Amino acid sequence: MRATAAAAFSLLTCSCLRSTSPTRLPSSSLRLPLRRGPLAAMSTAASFRPEAARSPPAVQPPAPPLSKVFKVALCQLSVTADKARNIARAREAIEAAAAGGAKLVLLPEIWNGPYSNDSFPEYAEDIEAGGDAAPSFSMMSEVARSLQITLVGGSISERSGNKLYNTCCVFGSDGELKGKHRKIHLFDIDIPGKITFKESKTLTAGQDLTVVETDVGRIGIGICYDIRFQELAMLYAARGAHLLCYPGAFNMTTGPLHWELLQRARAADNQLFVATCAPARDTSAGYIAWGHSTLVGPFGEVIATAEHEETTIMAEIDYSLIDQRRQFLPLQYQRRGDLYQLVDVQRSGSDE
């Protein structure tokens, strides 16, 4: 039986609570035992058990099938109320990126229509049905196949039965759907005098983590608000992701404060690449996106970033930097498995 959404993301448990089976604490909780007096003196390097800090143990990333070095393109698109125009513009941007040598292309969050609770139902597509019921999906599949690229298709509103999801589709160079991520953490915010928006009024939260094997390595997928949750990034890193991709649409309140900060934190803490792709800013829209699509390296360094206008930025990803950074700062050998543990409930309950 599938674990609950809360249990699936992060269960951090203390050694003082563990017996033969870990005690599970609520999502996003980290509790450390207080050490005083003689007990504190026993906490020496000999007691460190980094291998026990993850359960099941982390999956070692496989060597990327094609090359450790490739170009990535982040297509920061201007989004209008004209769906056909948005689809055509996205295709043009993807084709231009591929012509420039990109092997991986990212699109923004909700790129085929306005980001609003009123628009989600109107612009939603039935991905399972395909064809005329999913013109955005069909275009992405066809262009990935024709250009022989890996495409992280930003996100679109997906209709499934009587539910709506904020969904990212990942296509391989054969045009086949390699993975589908439904936004796990819905964006609900209420800052008086600044911004009020609640995705949960219209959308349903996804229930699955998404790590996809592609021609350019193993990619962990999140959408916008998912980037706030370090537990999700840690689980993707433990599942061997080389790169985390977050189509996102931070706003004019949270964008200046947190957008780059969160990307750099996710990259530095997990020592891997993070790529984000946002819509271009439209000051006449009901929801104004911050923009600033960005690629960050495994030391938290900003490799490339956009401003707020419509543009495509191209940059190079070199996976050898992951091993180099992990040698410089060997966090995987320094985790305190004697004090805490990250439990991947989904993987521990599978045959993987």
Image (cartoon, rainbow, N blue to C red):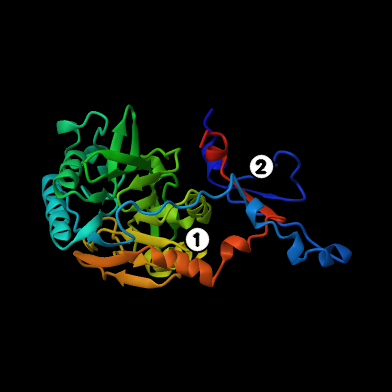
71 on left or right of 350: left
309 on left or right of 301: left
Residue sitting at x 64%, y 53%: 51
Residue 280 seen in the figure? yes
Q: CA distance from mark 2 to mark 1?
A: 23 Å
- Mark 2 belongs to which amino acid? Arg
Tag shown at residue 338: none
Q: Nearer the viewer, residue 2 or 283?
A: 2
Residue sitting at x 23%, y 62%: 280
Q: Nearer the viewer, residue 171 or 45?
A: 45
Label 1 crowd (10 A; few <14 / some 14-19 / many >=20): many
Percent from the top left, x then y, of residue 52? 66, 51
Q: Which residue is mark 1?
A: 270
- Going from the N terminus, do you reach mark 2 or mark 1 first? 2
Q: Which residue is mark 2?
A: 24
- Mark 1 belongs to which amino acid? Asn
Percent from the top left, x then y, of residue 129? 23, 28
